[in-house]
Image (spheres, grey):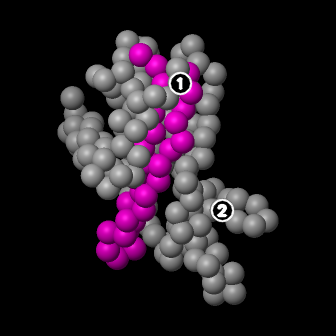
Amino acid sequence: MSLFKRTIRSAAVLASATAALLGLGAVSAHADTAPGVMAKPRLSINKLGGDQCQLTVITNVGMTQAQAQYQVDNGATVRIEVWADDLVYDNRVYKAPNALLTASKYDSGLIVTAQPKVPCSYLNEDKSQNFDAEGDEIYAKVIFEGPGYSRMAKNSNVVNGRW
């Protein structure tokens, strides 16, 4: 396993543990996800310093461990897109690399985790004080495509902040 994949896998485990400790939608909270259904993704955004923000997206698709491992081994992909939630229309502000997929050992399905780092300025959707009274509203769109499953897409919670 490459250093990159080990780093991503370690980050995913850390994100899942952090989410469990903070009550942000731990993987065990999705254990009852119906087969073939994607749970509502959870998004959190943390400023890292300077103009860097780290996004954490966690969800799962309900299926058995064997089905999840089949998806991992046979090219299933999950794209993460970051969107600005606007009154008139939503606009995509960032397209992240594909998420990490893991087959759960506890039958909660295919676990999806992503922790892209982006310039915080990407998340400043309004770029104007006139429209920024409430701050910026950001959500993630998670798109799953895998063998034997129809394409699935779900939006995460909306995170408000000033970036």
* Residue 3 visible in the current orientation: yes
Residues drawn in magenta: 36-64
Nearer to me, 123 or 132: 132
* x and y percentages locating residue 52 in the rendered image: 38, 68
Q: Which mark is residue 98?
A: none
Helix, strand or loop for disc 1? loop
Image point 57% across, 37% down: which residue? Answer: 143
Residue labelled with disc 2: 85
Q: Nearer the viewer, mark 1 or mark 2?
A: 1
* x and y percentages locating residue 155 in the rendered image: 60, 47
* x and y percentages locating residue 44 in the rendered image: 43, 58
The amino acid beneath tag 2 is Asp
Which secondary structure class fits the magenta region best? strand
136 horizontally vs 120: left or right: right
* Residue 4 visible in the current orientation: no
Residue labelled with disc 1: 34
Image point 49% across, 29% down: which residue? Answer: 33
Dot 1: within a 10 Å radius of its alpha carbon, few (fewer than 14), some, or many (20 or more) residues? Answer: some
Nearer to me, 134 or 2: 134
Helix, strand or loop for disc 2? loop
Q: Closer to the N terminus: mark 1 or mark 2? A: 1
State the image quarter where residue 126 is shown: bottom right
Tell me the quadrant of the picture where the N terminus can be found: top left
How far is disc 1 from disc 2 in space, using C-alphas? 28 Å
The amino acid beneath tag 1 is Ala
Residue 62 lies in magenta, yes or no?
yes
